[in-house]
Amino acid sequence: MRATALPRARRRTYLPGRFKLTVWERLQPFYEELLQRQLFTLKNLEDWLLDRSELDAFVSESFAWRYINISSDSSNKQAQESYQYAIKELSPQIADYTFKLNSKLVDHPLRDQLDPTRFGIYLRAIKNLVELFREENVELETEVQLESKQHGKIFSEMTVGVNEVNLTLQKASALLEEPDRVYREDVYHKINQRILQDAENLESLYDNLLKKRHRIAVNAGFSNFRDYRFRKLGRFDYEPEDCTDFHDSIRDEILPLVDQLYAHRKVDLGLEELRPWDLHVDTSGQKPLRPFMNMEDLVKKASTCLQRVHPQFGAVLRQMREMGHLDLDSRPGKRPGGYNMPLLMTGVPFIFMNASRSLGDMRTLLHECGHAVHSYLTRDLPLSFTRRVPSEVAELAAMSMELLTMDHWDVFFEDEATLRRARLQQLENVLKVLPWIATIDKFQHWVYTHPEHNREDRQQKWVEFFREFNSSHINHAGLEDYETHLWHKQLHLFEVPFYYIEYGIAQLGAIAIWQQYRQHPARTVERYRTALRLGYTRSIRDIYDAAGIEFNFSREYVHKLGKFVKEEIDLLLKEEQA
């Protein structure tokens, strides 16, 4: 039991125990002390790094709670004001000191004597940030950060009337699983017509964000924001050309498998053609899977499921529940989407999502629990930087957790037939999401490397890429207006540009981990935990290697992984027909 116990929050050694972040005047002295401190010895430098790390973790957690609060209730004026104060007043000041502290470290004569196994990745990142910093970008980045949140606010206020009840888009989308086709079509139109009502607002928002991001890139000496963003994200392990390889591999190796799945769906549903409202309904004609009754039931079952994979995994979710670090249900005024928010001082993160009793909600919680376990396993790393893992690794943790838990989904589904339906939907989703990821990523590459484009150019390119990666079995005739604006719903395009291909990279890695888990469960889970415990103390490729898998986008590798998933799907289909 001792191995699964969760320790208390990190003890402060630099900041006063009861210090809270309120105004800049109270925070500034700590930054100033770090800036002025004399560092004569290597021990002085290492102690300085640890103190700075504690301040960074404290500020990060303070900002995290402010974002959680505006996510939970977009109408909370006090929360909005608190968040905006942090972004408008605190962030620019912190950015200024961060650059000065980074420069102090990069210029320090003892820097190269720091242990490369402990500090190597960190020093590489700091040097990169110093090279990218431009004073004129501080205000621009603040504006972009605030404006990009308008996307979430716009979508949080969208509701549609179904059966005389106003539903959030998340809850309405769950109705696309209902067996009545006419009903599904009606819901589909209502959702997309509602999104179109804000098309002009979303296009204007995106235009503005593109202009400011391009200025940021040019200020930093780049010809386009794509190249700047790759550097800012610290993508040292792969380049834009590797993303093109990913796009091509998904189109050539995964899309044909997805076409087979949709062809099978069309036959099972007895349809001459598939329409977008036919993609989520169970092909058996049965009611949608409802793996839990309410949020309490969801957490209880998920905890048991995680416990079976490893006792530590279940303990993390139970601790989050006890600490009130879960906000799971969908409600009006709550921002869309879901996330796991690391809390670098507390060491126990916060999960936010919009559940509506669907299989997707169950999968989302298990996904976010993968992030949460990752946060927990890195909580004792001394540098806060190394607890902030790159997305390619973070999403590997989350997507692998979805597949690792799948053998234990009988907690949610008691009879074999229902369990088989759930597993089939999960594995089909593993393949089907990859072409969408490639679409979004290829679209972003074009958008930011063609800064002079207009809206019409952008719409044409979106439709071109969407059709390149969309199954030929899905008929969008008569829905061209919806099709043109489908990208509006993708929050990442607005808030976190170029943060999306990581899901695809990690999905491939998760398939590889699951393939090994089927043969060697205990060994695979230990490799998984070993890789996650590294945090960001090693390169992405080294972390994947520690997990026993490859960091590889080649057609041959993608073909092998896709073939394995398709074979597992075919086995389940045979069992279903037996």
Image (cartoon, helix red, strand yellow):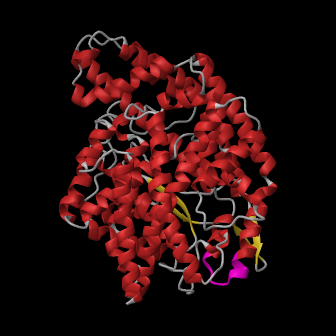
Q: Residue at x 35, y 71 (%)?
A: 568
Q: Is residue 505 above or below residue 16?
A: below
- Figure quadrant of residue 137: top right
What is the count of numbered marks? 0
Left or right of residue 508, residue 182 in this image: right
Percent of width and height locating residue 479: 76, 63
Percent of width and height locating residue 66: 57, 45
Toward the bottom, the furthest residue is 578
**Quadrant the C terminus occupies:** bottom left
Q: Is residue 563 above or below residue 206?
A: below
Q: Is 137 included in the stretch rendered in magenta? A: no
Percent of width and height locating residue 239: 44, 33
**Quadrant the N terminus occupies:** bottom left
Q: Residue at x 28, y 36 (%)?
A: 538
Q: Residue at x 72, y 29 (%)?
A: 452
Q: Is 179 included in the stretch rendered in magenta? A: yes
Q: Is residue 32 visible?
A: no
Magenta-colored span: 177-184
Left or right of residue 476, residue 404 in this image: left
Q: Is residue 286 visible?
A: yes
Q: Residue at x 28, y 19 (%)?
A: 45
Left or right of residue 454, residue 178 in this image: left
151 or 430, nearer to the observer: 430
Percent of width and height locating residue 76: 68, 52
